Amino acid sequence: MSVERVLLTNDDGIDATGIRALYDALATDYDVVAVAPTGDRSSAGRALSEGVEVADHELGYAVDGTPVDCVVAGLDALVPDADVVVAGCNEGANLGAYTLGRSGTVSAAVEAAFFDVPAVATSMYVPGGDDWWKRELEPAEFANATRATRYLVAEATASGAFDRVDYLNVNAPIADGERDGPAPMRVTAPSPWYGMEAAHDGNGRVSFSDPIWGRMNEGDVPDPIGTDRRAVVDGEISVSPLSVPHAAEPDAGLDEVAAAYGRATESVR
């Protein structure tokens, strides 16, 4: 397939540095229209509003809603002729299987798949442990992410990859001005490692933490080569080819359980 028009969205907000960097990179080859939230809607997952306010923006449209709101509004009303949806570039990585339902960036790509539109979700790993988000990022630091996204929009569509998968979850290391050339690219699978922790303070509050960030900062990741998290820690661009919806397993041993349901509930009538 050929790509002419790109719908660009994110979850950091339409004025974020990452979406501007990606817009500038893609606009050299494509007609890019941004349909993105007015502000930060990180970790919104696939939340959908009943309706949203839309305003014109120099990049396209600013939507007072979630990333999924932006994709639905974009593909069904504002930019219905988009050939590809690109979500990002997220300021922070979206790594591991457990982020796929939580990340607004990835959820935008998932939503596009239900419209049968190929999508690329792009995020950038920012080192620094639990306080990485305090870092002020410059457009040049997104170079690995923008270069990889521009390449994949062209080459993954031309190769027919989207005949076999619905979207690509891309995570790139932050660009280092001292690095010689672009980071290498590796096809990966999302890491299955899960380590979320909860702490109850005894006074009605439970706080959450994800210990993986500290382990990544020390280079002590629990993932083998071939996983997304290992790739970015090793300085590679991770590309995970993924599909939706979740696969249904017809042989899960539930046929007899379902058949017995009527007999089991007769006693409660």
Image (cartoon, rainbow, N blue to C red):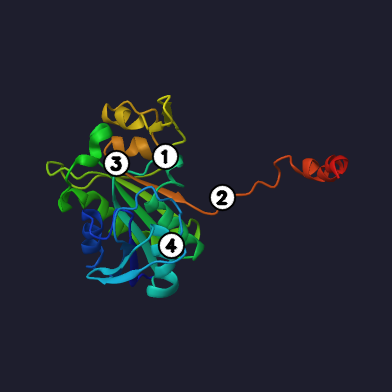
Secondary structure of the residue carrying tag 1 is loop
Q: Amino acid at mark 2?
A: His
Secondary structure of the residue carrying tag 2 is loop
Q: Earlier in the sequence, mark 3 or mark 1?
A: 1
- Identified at 50% across, 53% down, the residue is 243
* Residue denoted by label 2: 246
Badge nearest the viewer, 2 or 3:
2
* Residue at mark 2 to residue at mark 3: CA–CA distance: 27 Å
- Identified at 42% across, 62% down, the residue is 69
* Residue denoted by label 4: 118
Q: Position of residue 43 (x, y in %)?
A: 38, 47
Q: Position of residue 218 (x, y in %)?
A: 27, 26
Identify the disc placed on residue 236. Answer: 3
Q: Earlier in the sequence, mark 4 or mark 1?
A: 1
Q: Amino acid at mark 1?
A: Gly
Identify the disc placed on residue 96. Answer: 1
Dot 3 alpha-carbon crowd within 10 angstroms: few under 14, some 14 to 19, many 20 or more: many
Question: Along the line of sight, which residue is nearer the eye, 144 or 74?
Answer: 74
Badge nearest the viewer, 4 or 2:
2
* Residue at mark 3 to residue at mark 1: CA–CA distance: 15 Å
**Contact check, label 4 and label 1, Cβ < 8 Å:** no
Question: Along the line of sight, which residue is nearer the eye, 228 or 211?
Answer: 211
